[in-house]
Structure formats: structure tokens, C-alpha cells
Image: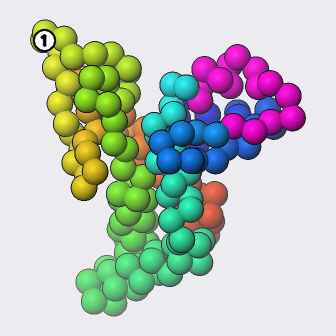
Amino acid sequence: MSVAEALTVARAAGVDLTVDGADLVLSAPAPPPALVIDLLSRHKVDIIAFLRAEGDGWTPDDWQAFFDERAGFAEHEGELPREEAEARAYACCVVEMMNRTLVVSDPDRCVYCGGDDRSGDRLLPFVATTTGHTWLHPACWESWFRGQQGDAAAALAAMGIGLAR
């Protein structure tokens, strides 16, 4: 399950989420179901990054301008057909969203599977930020990366940014 799906399940259960430093703060009219707590626990680091990106100051209009600027440049300066220019612009938006939601994780745990460093399956720093690294097993990287892309696409879609308009 992706971060966007976990957030959807939590919000459907009446749980509001905020970030306080490195903590995920839950507020709900009643104790959340165990499934919700489990999902939020498993995706805590990514949810915190996702929620921080939502509060980064960029509005849906800013994202649309980012998309339109790149599409226009690719179409007019790059002489690409509009459909291809928009596909490239959308890819730029996905990458920008991923860059804005980079996860700094515990170097003793894989951010994807939660496993530790073990012989034959070492934890490696796959993403470096100014504040730390994202630690993953090499076998977990592709699935984690695809999940990050999906979460970025879901966040953009929630703002109305996409290829089918």
C-alpha cells in the first residue's frame, strides 16, 4: 500500500494527521482502528515527508504554473508536439514532487521493508539529502522508488495536475 492509500484509509476513519518535528500527530474523535495505526506506523517516515511537502508553500496553482512552463518550453523551444511536451512536463513535476518529499531514514533499517543490515543484504544510502540519507536494501530500491513515483503522481492528481485535462 502506498502513502497516498494509507492517508486515504486514515482520513476515511476520521483521523487527521499533522507533523510536529519528527513526530506524526494523530487526532480523531475515537481511537483509530488497529489497521489504521498499523498502516501509519509502517509508512510513518514517508507520510511525514509527504505531509511536509503538502505544506511547502506551493499551491496547486504553483504546480500548474510549473507544469505549464515546462510544457511550453518543450513545445516551443524544443519543438515537440504538445502531447509529448506535456508528457515531459508531467515527468518533471513527478520528479520535483519526489525531490520535495525526500525521506531521511534510520541507517539501521530499510525504509521500504523495515529490515536491518544483514550479510548478503546490506543497507545502502540510495538518496542523499542535506540532512541525511534514505537507507534501503538493494532489492527493495525499485519497489520503493515506484511507490515514491506513485505517491508523487497521486499528490499531483489531487491538485488537478496530470496529462488528461
Q: Position of residue 104 (x, y in %)?
A: 33, 42
Q: Position of residue 128 (x, y in %)?
A: 22, 48
Report the quarter where the N terminus lies. Answer: top right
Q: Does dot 1 land on a helix, a strand or a loop? A: loop
Residue visible at 60% across and 20% down in the picture:
38
Residue visible at 68% across and 25% down in the picture:
36
- Categorize mark 1 by other alpha carbons within 10 Å: few (<14), some (14-19), many (20+): few
The answer, for residue 125, to whether it is visible in the render is yes
Residue 155 occupies quadrant: bottom right
Residue visible at 46% across and 75% down in the picture:
67
The answer, for residue 142, to whether it is visible in the render is no
Q: Which residue sits furthest left?
A: 120
Tag 1: amino acid: Gly
Q: Is residue 118 magenta?
A: no
Q: Is residue 32 magenta?
A: yes
Q: Which residue sits furthest front?
A: 21
Q: Position of residue 94 (x, y in %)?
A: 41, 58
In this rendering, position of residue 24 left or right of residue 78:
right
Report the quarter where the C terminus lies. Answer: bottom right
Residue visible at 38% across and 21% down in the picture:
113
Q: Position of residue 4 (x, y in %)?
A: 58, 42
Towards the viewer: 90 or 137: 137
Above or below for 71 versus 119: below
Q: Which residue sits furthest bottom?
A: 76
Residue 25 occupies quadrant: top right
Above or below for 20 versus 106: below
Name the residue beneath numbered marker 1. 120
Above or below for 71 versus 101: below
Q: Which residue sits furthest top?
A: 119
In this rendering, position of residue 80 left or right of residue 43:
left
Q: Which stretch is magenta?
A: 26-40
Towards the viewer: 8 or 41: 41
